[in-house]
Image (tube, rainbow, N blue to C red):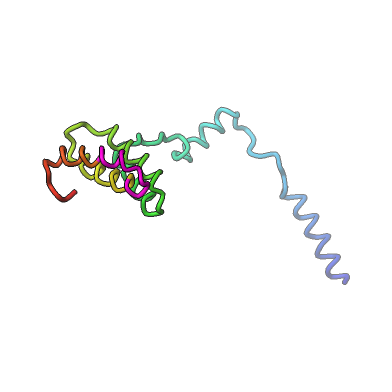
């Protein structure tokens, strides 16, 4: 027991002498310098998000569709169509997937309009 008390007392003396537990932080650096140093170490926090493009919306649509969230997928495919040019070849796949989602949702008038658009874009081709 005496050894335990002696070791504990020794550790308290050593730790207090070395400054362990000092909450003062780094000294000699201004707050502005500290922000700059932290910014240099952390480029992730200062980077900007990439723009959301048609491929991003399409991928989100595929994920939503795979989770049977046909309403969410339809919203994503509509975003794809809004982002793409009228003659972009990717429109045919987005139209196809949108028509499938609308059919699952039993939104038959919308699905019919989408399928008609699909037939126009594909020139009557069967495959997406």
Reply yes or no: does residue 113 show up in magenta.
yes
**What residue is rendered at 72% in x and 48% in y?**
21
In the image, is 84 to the left or to the right of 37?
A: left
In the image, is 125 to the left or to the right of 47?
A: left
The correct choice, above or below, for 6 with respect to 86 in the image is below
Q: How many marks?
A: 0
Segment colored magenta:
103-114
**What residue is rendered at 80% in x and 54% in y?**
13
Quadrant location of residue 86?
A: top left
In the image, is 9 to the left or to the right of 120?
A: right
| Main SS, magenta residues | helix
**What residue is rendered at 11% in x and 41% in y?**
123
**What residue is rendered at 84% in x and 70% in y?**
3
The correct choice, above or below, for 59 with respect to 85 in the image is below
Of residues 107 and 114, the one drawn nearer to the viewer in this rendering: 107
Reply yes or no: does residue 4 show up in magenta.
no
The correct choice, above or below, for 39 with respect to 105 in the image is above
In the image, is 71 to the left or to the right of 17?
A: left
Q: Where residue 50 sits in the image (x, y, percent)?
A: 36, 36
């Amino acid at each position: 027991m005496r050894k335990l008390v002696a070791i504990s007392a020794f550790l308290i003396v050593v730790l207090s002498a070395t400054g362990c537990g000092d909450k003062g932080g780094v000294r000699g650096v201004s707050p502005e310098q500290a922000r700059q140093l932290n910014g240099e170490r952390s480029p992730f926090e200062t980077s900007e998000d990439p723009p959301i493009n048609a491929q991003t919306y399409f991928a989100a649509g595929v994920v939503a569709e795979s989770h049977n969230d046909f309403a969410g997928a339809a919203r994503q495919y509509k975003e794809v169509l809004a982002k793409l040019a009228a003659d972009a070849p990717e429109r045919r796949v987005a139209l196809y997937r949108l028509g499938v989602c609308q059919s699952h949702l039993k939104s038959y008038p919308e699905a019919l309009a989408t399928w008609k658009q699909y037939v126009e874009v594909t020139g009557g081709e069967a495959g997406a």
